[in-house]
Amino acid sequence: MQSRRNFVKWTAAGLPLLGFVRGAMGREIKKGKKPIVVSTWDGRSVNNAAWETMRSPDMTALDAVEAAARSIEATINCCVGLGGNPDRDGIVTLDACIMDHQFNCGSVAGLERIKHPISVARKVMEDSPHVMFVGAGAQQFALEQGFQLESPQLSETANKTYQEWLKTSEYKPIINIEQTQSRSGKGGPAAPSFLPDGSFNHDTMGTIALDSEGRLSGACTTSGMGFKMRGRVGDSPIIGSGLYIDNEVGAAVATGQGEEVIRVSGTHMIIEFMRQGKSPMKACKKAIERIYKINPSKARKFQVGFIAIDSCGVYGAYSLQPGFSYALKYEDGAGVLKEAESLLK
Ligand code: SD4
C-alpha cells in the first residue's frame, strides 16, 4: 500500500496524473486513468488506432495494442516494419512481441517479408504451443497461418539511407535521431518524430494499454537497429526485456539500444520495482540508473527509454539521454506528446 509520504514524493517528482482517493477504512487508493494508451516516441497516431479499437465493446487492450502496432507497420516509408532500415546485408528483418493480462505472450524475431510481425506474434501466442519463433521458421509459421509474402524490395527512404550508409559501412546507432530535426526548445515537448513527408524516423514502436475492464496489454514492433549485423536480435521481441506485463502490477515497454536493455532484463525489472511500491516513473528511472551504472562512460553513447503504466492507469517514463518522447491518450485528453525526464542532461 502506498503511504501519504510516497504520494507527496511522487507528486514532487512531477507525475501529472497521480492522485489518491480514500477507500474503505481511510485506505488510500491510487487513481490513474482507465482506459489509457501510452506509446514510445511520437505514438499519437498509433494511440488513436488503439483508442478507436478499444471503443468497441467487444475489443480488449490486447486488440488495441495489436491495432496500434499494425497501424505503424502499415505506414510506408516508416522505419518500423518493412519500410524500415535493413541490416548491413541490405535485408529488412523484423522483430515483434505481444503480451496480455494473463501472461500469454508471443514473439517473432528476424522475420523477413511479412508486413505485420505483430499479428504473427499474436498467432504464435494464440495458435502455437510456443512463445517465440525466429528467422526462416518464423516466416514458415506466418505463411502457414495465411500471411502473405511481400516483395523483398527496400522502401525508397530505406534504400536511400542504405546507399548512403554503404559509403562508410559504419555501425553507429544515432541517439535520438530526432535531435537532428528541429526541436521546440529545452524543456518543451519533444519535436514530433514524424518527418515532413509523413515518414516516422524511429525503428521501434512500443505501446501499452489498460482497458476499461482493467486488462493490461502491450505490443512492441521494430525493424531493429539499422545496419545491424545479419542475425542480430535486439530487446524488442524478448519478453522481459523489450516488453513485460503483470496485470497485478503494471506494464512496461522499452526502446533504444537493445543490447543494453537485454543486459538488465529492463522491462521485467521495472515491473519488479513497481511491485515493491515504486511509481511507474520511479521504476523506469531505477532501471535506467542500473543500465548507467554498468559502464557510465559507455552509457553516454547510447539511448534507452522506458514507459510504464501501473494497474490503476498511472503512467511514467524515463530515459538515459534527453530527447525521448512518448505519447498518451486517455478519455479526457486529446493525444498528448511529452518528453521524458532523463538521467543525463
Ligand atoms: C533494438 N530496441 O532493436 C530496438 C531499437 C529501438 O528506437 O528501439 N530503436 O535494439
Image (spheres, helix red, strand yellow):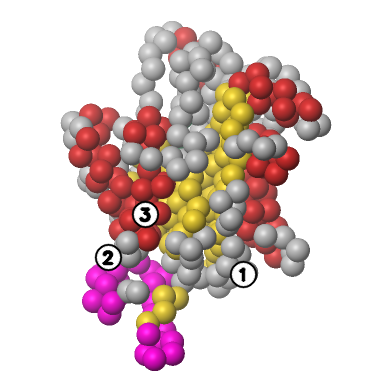
- Labelled pair 2, 3 in contact (Cβ < 8 Å): no
- Range of magenta residues: 3-27
Residue, disc 1: 212
Front-lying residue, 195 or 267: 267
Percent x, y for residue 128?
A: 70, 37
Quadrant housing residue 181: top left
Q: Residues within 10 Å of mark 3 (few under 14, many from 20)?
A: some
**Tag 1: amino acid:** Ser
Gap between marks 1 and 2 measured at Cα: 27 Å
Where 23 sits versus 259, above or below? below
Q: Residues within 10 Å of mark 1 (few under 14, many from 20)?
A: some
**Element type where label 3 sits in the image:** helix
Residue, disc 2: 13
Where 179 sits versus 331, above or below? above
Q: Residues within 10 Å of mark 2 (few under 14, many from 20)?
A: few
Front-lying residue, 17 or 273: 273
Residue furthest out toward the bottom: 25
Gap between marks 3 and 1 measured at Cα: 24 Å
Residue, disc 3: 272
**Tag 3: amino acid:** Glu
Of the residues under marks 2 and 3, which one precedes in the sequence?
2
- Labelled pair 3, 1 in contact (Cβ < 8 Å): no
Name the residue located 38 percent from the left edge and 26 percent from the top edge: 173
Residue furthest out toward the front: 129
